[in-house]
Amino acid sequence: MTSNTSENLYDTVPDAQGRFGQYGGKFVAETLMAALADLEVVYRTLAVDEQFQQEIDNDLQHYVGRPSPLYEASRWSDSIGGARIYLKREDLNHTGAHKVNNTVGQALLAKHMGKTRVIAETGAGQHGVATATIAARLGLDCVVFMGETDIQRQALNVYRMKLLGAEVVSVSSGSRTLKDAMNEAMRDWVTNVDTTFYIIGTVAGPHPYPMLVRDFQSVIGREARAQSLAQTGRLPDALVACVGGGSNAIGLFHPFLQDETVAMYGVEAGGHGVSTNQHAAPLTAGTPGVLHGNRTYLMQDGDGQIMDTHSISAGLDYPGVGPEHSWLKDIGRVNYVVAKDDEALRAFHKLTEIEGIMPALETSHALAYAETLAASMTPQQTIIVNLSGRGDKDILTVAKIDGIVV
Amino acid sequence: MSRIAGRFQQLAEQGRTALIPYIVAGDPSCDVTVPLMHRMVKSGADIIELGVPFSDPMSEGPVIQQGHERALENGMCLSQVLALVKEFRKFDDTTPLLLMGYANPVMHMGYAAFADAASAAGLDALLTVDIPPEEVEEINAELQRVGMDNIFLVAPTTPEERIVRIAAGASGFIYYVSLKGVTGAGHLDVNEVAQRLAAIRSHSTLPLAVGFGIKDADSAKTVAAVADGVVVGSALVDVMAQTVSRGGSSGQAIDAVAGLLDEIRKGIDSTAS
């Protein structure tokens, strides 16, 4: 494909129906259709409104602390001996992850729409914390839905949300993880649709969410692209990001999609291995279906029931993925690969010890794959890894695995 | 004429309102479902709505969610639900049957394969909660090919221009969701329902059934005064679950549903004109 057609291609999605090729769409109950239509109208108006964009930019700069640095991980790169690895430091954002880029944007949408209450689903708790944080700042009521299993493994973030004034609702249906939290958030939204704005944390859900979350997260890739040109004089040879729902990956990838020389790797949670069913890698081992309002790759059984997933990281423990990733997989623009629990855990320790940066377990999946990829490349080449979140929330999980009582 | 259209016409001639009970196929056990369906017909069910269990039933309140979970634990799946329909049809060729479920199991089977199997089993209609008019074209073509009705939802939040669009694609009847919320919620406002039904009637001549939030003879009676059909679901699933959890047998669970349905039928008929 020529550069011109590819430019047009990536700008054509989603289409008016919210489709990315055959993926995406609006598969929700009738009660929510009017709210989605309202949201789309408001978003399309505000997306080209200079004042609104200034409001967001101002928050990103002064409240979140952007731009986040692009940091050359020299000792780590030296130890591998291959490509030079740069880390896009989303862990340095206020609240410690990329999630806040999106909650800043959606909360401002909520405010403009006159909504007084926001709800969110959360897996690892990072999106819940980012939502509770913005809600505190804007004086909005905030309810966060979280699976019972995740509440246990992310206790610190649960308490953080409560300190921020949010109500955390424990979800004990289904697999008691992120997908069930999202079901419950949808149920709340359908009940309180007049007053409530649903801040979805990833590039999934019904249209227009995959589009607007992508747009809000694309600040990551826009900055990284400019920083790479300024710091290295060229574009990177490869991008690497972890993929659960896929918001940090889309945020990094999207502004580079037209740059044909830039290879992209989305790293799914391989759990105990994709041959075991104990994983969360729908793009690698799943098939297309409909969940949470969109058509996308899913982990499902022969009857179309959604399967339980497994990952060491609560934030990747999700059976679906954003529809744009499904499309990018099918057209071959992004390579989707996996890193297993133990590989992620090794990468967590490695980066902590060699760079003094403690990554989230989600991010550690991207780091694990980047290490393998870098080793196959030359020192003249560069890789940008999205360091999507910091690992403080995971210290207890890691200690438990390592057999240490904190 | 389809079984559904025929049934509503017959009821209209009698001045009666349709009673449409909902149960989850395979809940509380797989062998209860068909005998329960026959028993519900005896207790005055005009159309039976059979829930297809799904791992992520996003529009259901806790009572029906648990019904879905029990049914899945019992191994119920879409192809088995169609087998139950076929079994029911051996002894009842007149009661209209409607499947209510979510998009993914149907999509996974394949719309064409589903339409063929469902039609062969004797199913009359499908209602997929998460396939709104925007996404319905593909499956509607298959349902129409085999002469099945696609039942659409209209919600309290549906604007008038959408009602027009839904009415244009609907057949069988239109299902009005009586409240903003999940199944089994408890804040039904009958005056509001009446107003909304009048708005829908100005765009469609199809019968209008009302569901979500109708749980007993009283609420059924008030809704029946303004609607052509009354859907009752959570209350039935709940009475079954409670009977079983108290150690009751399958037969007692069926009796409990039939008892509640008898009362609701009486409530509805007390409004008959």
Image (cartoon, helix red, strand yellow):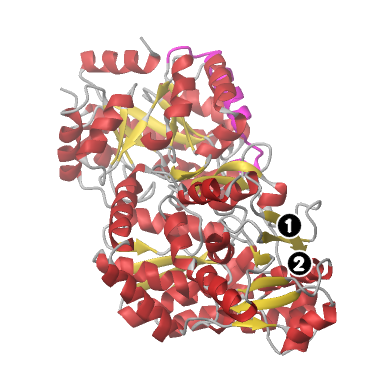
The answer to whether residue A296 shows anywhere in this view is yes
SS at mark 2 in the image: helix
Residue depicted at x 42% and y 71%: A103
Residue located beneath label 1 in the image: A337
User: Chief secondary structure of the magenta span?
Assistant: helix
How much space separates mark 2 and mark 1, taking CA atoms?
Answer: 8 Å
> Does residue B244 show up?
no
Quadrant assignment for the N terminus of chain B: top left
- Mark 2 or mark 1: name the one nearer the start of the chain: 1
Q: Position of residue B118 (x, y in %)?
A: 54, 21
Subunit of mark 2? A
Badge 2 vs badge 1, beta-carbon distance below 8 Å: yes
Q: Nearer the viewer, residue A343 or A187?
A: A343
Instruction: Note whether A322 is above or below B241 in the view shown.
Output: below
Residue type at the position of mark 1: Val
Q: Quadrant of residue A364?
A: bottom right
Kindly identify which residue carries mark 2.
Answer: A369
Amino acid type, label 2: Tyr
Q: In which chain is the residue bearing label 1?
A: A
- In the rendered image, residue A278, in percent from the top left (x then y), is placed at 75, 56
Q: Which residues are magenta?
A: B71-94
